[in-house]
Image: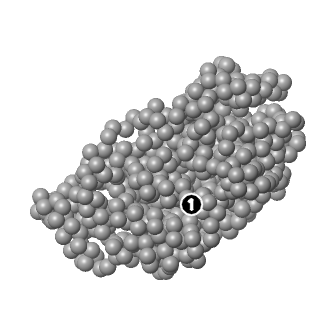
Amino acid sequence: MNKKHKLRVGLVALASLGLVAGILAPAQGARNTIVFHETNPLTGFNTGQKNMNLTANTAVSYMSGIGFGYFDDKGNYIDNTVFGTQRASGSGSKFKITYTVAPGRVFSDGTPITAVNLLLSHVTRSNAYAIAAGLGDPKSATASAFDSAGYSSTWDQFVVGDPVLSADKMSITVSFKGKFADWKLYAPGPSAVHTMVLIADGKTSLQPVAVNVDATADFEKAFFAKDTAFLKKLATVYNTNYKITTVTSSTNPLLFVGNGGYIVSSAVDKQSVTMKKNPRYNSGPAFKGDIDTVVFRYITDGTAASQALSNGELDVYQGQVTADALAALKKISSVKVVGTSAAIYEHFDTRLGKNANDPNQPEYNGPFAAKFGEKARALRQAFLMCVPRQEIVDKLIKPFDPASVVLGSTFTLPGSDIYDNVIRANGSKFYTGTQEELNKRARALIKKYAPEVTVAKPLTIKIQVPGNNERRANQFALAKANMAKCGFDLVGDVQAAWSPRIGFTEYDAVFFAYVQTSNAQAGSAANFKLGGSNNRMGVNIPALTTLMDSLNTPMSRTVLAQKFIAAERIIHDQGITVGVFQHPQVTAVNKDLSGIKPAVYSPTLVWNWWEWSY
């Protein structure tokens, strides 16, 4: 799962600033350009890095590259045989997958794509390879030279040895400990490794194909030789060169070579990213439309974004809406409004410890820290009981989604075939009842384990509040008011650029939404396992890590439900998180634009860029 970051609040000031600065150029007048609205700005171009797998970043990277498959708007996995094939063979400990790249595929600079371009995925996913290559142990305090979020993942859990490259270099065969669930979803992606080699060598411009092929060969040699010095130079490029948010004509074009339909051409920090059609694209579905330019406009103020849509400065808008905002959208005659359900859920989390993915963060010594034992656990439980979830749903969601319910599970959503079975036995009942009942139980817990805390002498809890978001501001206000009745003084830190700060140990708690990117059986495992790429709240519970790892094994839905129940019993017992509601998804689209089909999984809007047209 990735994080979803949404919008709302504020006034026209930001819109006015944008218009003066020339940020919002007319959209609906250009019939070969689409302008998308995004709430939160891009933070970098390498979504494989820790803390960079954010919605705004992944939308750009998704359009820049394409591999063995993708999800359609209904959540079905589609094999992309234009790019290549995945073929499984053997069983048990002899389970293997052969990944074959179709001949003739090229990157945007004309460089041929081969199976060598799949090998970087192994470098950035396999703990064993990182150790053997002298790059460092990803699980150690010093970690690996590559700041990759892919270590300690499903690939690492199951892979055996290194990939075997075919004689024609168009296939790699990978051995695994056994068959694992959803194996197609973990295929290695094509990386333009020649560009990293060239950047490491000091090149600042696109090179002839012959030079690029030689650079790819250099990477191949270094990969199999486990050339530490060579690979560490690439790690420096991987970690630092893509961490930019401004792109001009002087920016190194090697950073943006890809095999997707669109390539980054410019970016203005916190304002926009512009992508141009890749004339050499041949790695996926053929273009049906004639869109030459795609622009992402970052407008955190929901009112300003809605006004920009009304003015024809945006073509596609998607975000969190209030009842009033939805009514306003429907009044814009130039757009059509589409309501759908999305695999996105709002939740409140407590911090147990340091974010292991950010070595620069200090230790967490707040009241919820796991090292403080039963007292901290009781405080976490009491805090989550005092989140007025039903009031939030009733006042903020039901006015435009009457069927919305308070969530009872972290791993499955209402409507799933196993949801009802899971919530019956997962310990979520501990956090249910009238709010008066929950407050009373919370106060009793506090009195027993932290008698110094009272309503008159409350415990200060610092929580990050996503800024420029009316709904989130209202959620915080409701939570703060009820927390005061329980003995918590909820102090909000409003941050417009909040998503990179989720793991900051200055916060005792956070609330935001997770976006599901696939139907992978393991689901939210990375949020709760030790070493998980999304474990930003310092969760370190061996039994929970074991359960998370076990989710990668093929199993029946009945067994899966039992795994979820066991994991959520721990989560609820430890007071780690509670879900609040599933996000209703509202999309407004220029009536003249076709092919926009909001999807269940992220990236919800750009999954089918080859179909768009006016």
Locate the C terminus by quadrant: bottom right
Q: Left or right? Give the position of 387 relative to 84.
A: left
Q: Give the image location of residue 14, x and y in percent.
A: 45, 49
Local SS, label 1: loop
Q: Which residue is mark 1?
A: 551
Determine the residue positioned at 78% across, 26% down: 217
**Image vertical order of residue 432 relative to residue 130, above or below:** below
**In the drawing, does residue 341 fall left or right of residue 65?**
left
Q: Crowding at label 1, few (<14), some or many (≥20) Cα neighbours within 10 Å?
A: many
Choose between 85 and 563: the one closer to the eye.
563
- Quadrant in the rendering for residue 256: top right
Quadrant occupied by the N terminus: bottom right
Q: Nearer the viewer, residue 45 or 217?
A: 217
Would residue 470 be found to the left or right of residue 278 on screen?
Answer: left
**Along the line of sight, which residue is nearer the eye, 155 or 54?**
155
Q: Residue at x 66, y 27 (%)?
A: 226
Instruction: Please identify the quarter of the rendering in which residue 200 is found.
Output: top right
Q: Amino acid at mark 1?
A: Leu
